[in-house]
Image (cartoon, grey):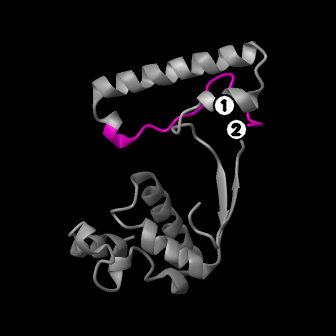
């Protein structure tokens, strides 16, 4: 939501019932550790149970949703012009970006290149065209990143 020139439309948890079970995202760093994955799943199960209890007690879904975790999936539609999309790719395709937004940004870039190859041919993280804009926080792998986005 940090890109001011973009327009966002997000599925509301207020009007979507998660009575059966809400979908949740599992970060790869948790998924690769079986014991932590087990605890994570148990916590999600408990959250589902409490959410259903609240609904059954007559609590409106818009209030019951307060127990839902950040991991709860949502649908979002994002609209931006080409200039802002190029800026978005510079920031969010970077290896220093949070993994979830980076995965989405790379998928979006693939789609954008398919629709408008001339505009998005050189799009990607800021280090594709020069030095890393992250400065001291660089991933230190500019050559690798450039190869990755050439092959995209």
Residue nearer the viewer, 43 or 142: 43
At 58% from the left edge and 21% from the top edge, which residue is drawn?
48
Picture layout, residue 10 above or below residue 72: below
Q: Earlier in the sequence, mark 2 or mark 1?
A: 2
Label 1 neighbour load within 10 Å: few <14, some 14-19, many 20+: some
Residue wearing tag 1: 65
Tell me if I can see residue 138 in this picture.
no
At 35% from the left edge and 41% from the top edge, which residue is drawn?
28
Name the element at disc 2.
loop
Q: Position of residue 89 (x, y in %)?
A: 47, 72
The quarter of the picture where residue 134 lies is: bottom left
* Region in magenta: 13-29
Tell me if I can see residue 35 in this picture.
yes
Dominant secondary-structure state across the stretch colored magenta:
loop
The quarter of the picture where residue 142 lies is: bottom left
Q: Is residue 38 on the magenta stretch?
A: no
Picture layout, residue 72 above or below residue 97: above
Tell me: 64 left or right of 35. Answer: right
Residue nearer the viewer, 52 or 75: 52
At 55% from the left edge and 68% from the top edge, which residue is drawn?
111
Label 2 neighbour load within 10 Å: few <14, some 14-19, many 20+: some
Q: Position of residue 145 (x, y in %)?
A: 29, 71
Name the element at disc 1.
helix
Q: Are marks 2 and 1 in contact (CB under 8 Å)?
A: yes
At 46% from the left edge and 82% from the top edge, which residue is drawn?
121
Residue wearing tag 2: 13
Q: Position of residue 146 (x, y in %)?
A: 30, 76
């Amino acid at each position: 939501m940090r890109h001011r020139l973009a327009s966002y439309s997000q599925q509301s948890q207020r009007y979507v019932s998660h009575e059966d079970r809400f979908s949740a995202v599992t970060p790869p760093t948790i998924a690769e550790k079986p014991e932590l994955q087990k605890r994570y799943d148990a916590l999600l199960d408990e959250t589902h149970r409490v959410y259903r209890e609240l609904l059954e007690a007559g609590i409106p879904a818009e209030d019951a949703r307060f127990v839902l975790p950040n991991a709860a999936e949502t649908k979002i539609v994002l609209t931006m012009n080409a200039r802002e999309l190029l800026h978005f790719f510079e920031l969010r395709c970077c290896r220093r970006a949070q993994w979830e937004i980076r995965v989405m940004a790379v998928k979006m870039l693939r789609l954008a290149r398919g629709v408008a190859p001339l505009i998005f041919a050189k799009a990607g993280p800021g280090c594709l065209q020069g030095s890393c804009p992250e400065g001291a926080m660089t991933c230190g792998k500019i050559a690798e990143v450039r190869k990755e986005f050439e092959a995209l």
